[in-house]
Image: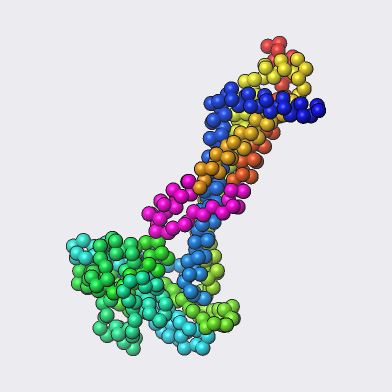
Amino acid sequence: MRPLTKLRAVLGITVAQLTHERTRTVLAIFGIALAVLSTTLLASVGYGVVETGQQKFDASGRDLWITGGPVQLAPGSVGGFENTLTDAHGISRNLTSREDVRTATPMAFQTVYVGTNPDNLQTIVGTGVRGTGSSGAAQITEGKGLTGNDRHYASGNYDGPMTREVLIGPRTARLLNVSVGDTIHLGGTVVSARQNEFTVIGISPTFSRFLGTPSVILRLSELQELTGTTQTDPATMITIDLESGVDTAAVEQELQQEYPQYDVRTNQEQLQSILADKAVVLASGLVLVILAVLAGVALTANLLALLVYQQRQQLAAAKALGISSSVLIGTAASQGLMLGLLGGAVGLAITPFASAGLNALAAQLVGFEGLVQTPDLVFIVGAVVAVVIGMIGSLVAGWRVGRVRPLTHLES
């Protein structure tokens, strides 16, 4: 019964100490909870970004992506972006002629001016595609898509009449307060937008979800005309939908050899490429997690060490009265472990509510929903962090108790 008796004594003294020093206890719990919460939230954001990105790529229905490298800003130019893939119509036509390719859809992204009033224009992202009907480039929730031949791109000369049809995203519809059948001004410059009117023929959430921003969709050739880029026929990417049963890896290798100046990737590789471009952001998040954990460790260890220091005379007296060092060390160590468990429980309890708040904020700021996801693994990581912090605090406290010398402190 001796070990059980010691355990009861240790737990009793621990609870008494924590309830007596309430300010320090609350402060320690808060610090550990903050460390755990920052860890779980940053882990949830990282997990959610990867999962959301994978879901977006999977939902696109595309097998391969051809890009000319990252989209670059072009300050001072119309559209504001430098799309590095050229001869987009010609390449997509060659790709479509292959037996293993069902569709090849070039896409370009540029900043455009839109508005119902020519004197009150908004800047949003314009997406240029060859069509949204049989190609399935966009989901149409209201109205119709961009169907039929591209009359403006007549034999590659851009001399045909423009259809002046446009699809808008739900966020654009709310921003401009327009619906199917309404007319809006649209152009690559303010002057161009005032001179060009387009009819809204449908509502499509596809690119608003993909880009996380209000957007409009029009034919690629017409976007190129409005932004003055018809000379090089540029595009941001070409998405490829293969015939069923085709070996994706084999086609990827063939196309990479045929177009060595461009990057040919699968959905997974394209997502990895995007994440690799954000390596600095991901590394910053990891550093924040490490700093949060270290801050929790330092706070808990310092509080427990300070508590032992302030109680050194009482501990010395307890030793002189015959209370074993193991009981005193166990008491100090159990305080650290209990603080870790309490702080971890608070941090984990707050995590779902904080995640919901961040999700709502992210949806308002960037348009993406579900960016913060909390799988079971996130809670496991948070619990481990709390226990580790508590154990380190326990070791520090136990070490300080072991250094207490009864004669020295009682004589003073």
Quarter of the rendering occupied by the N terminus: top right
Dominant secondary-structure state across the stretch colored magenta: helix
Picture coordinates of residue 29 (x, y %)?
56, 34
Compared with residue 228, is residue 280 higher up or lower down, i.e. above or below?
above
Residue 381's spot in the image, x, y percent? 61, 48
Residue plotted at (72% across, 27% down): 8
Q: Quadrant of residue 197?
A: bottom left
Q: For this view, does 325 lie left or right of residue 98?
A: right
The relative height of residue 354 versus residue 180 in the rendered view (above or below) is above
Regarding residue 203, the answer to whether it shows in the image is yes
Can you see residue 287?
no
Residue 22: percent from left, percent from top? 55, 25
Residue 281 part of the magenta segment: no
Q: Is residue 100 above or below residue 192?
A: below
Query: Which residue is the extreme one toward the right?
Result: 1
The residue nearer to you, when weighing 258 against 92, is 92
312 displayed left or right of 174: right
Of residue 110 and residue 129, the one placed in the foreground of this image is 129
The C terminus lies in which quarter of the figure? top right
Displayed quadrant of residue 194: bottom left
Residues 337 and 81: in front is: 337
Image position, residue 402 (x, y; %): 73, 26
Seen as rendered, the residue at the extreme front is: 1
Tell me: 88 left or right of 279.
left
Magenta stretch bounds: 353-381
Residue at point 38%, 77% (across, down): 132
Say how many tags the image has.
Answer: 0
Image point (27%, 85%), residue name: 160
Q: Residue at x 76, y 26 (%)?
A: 5
| Residue nearest the observer in this picture, 341 or 246 | 341
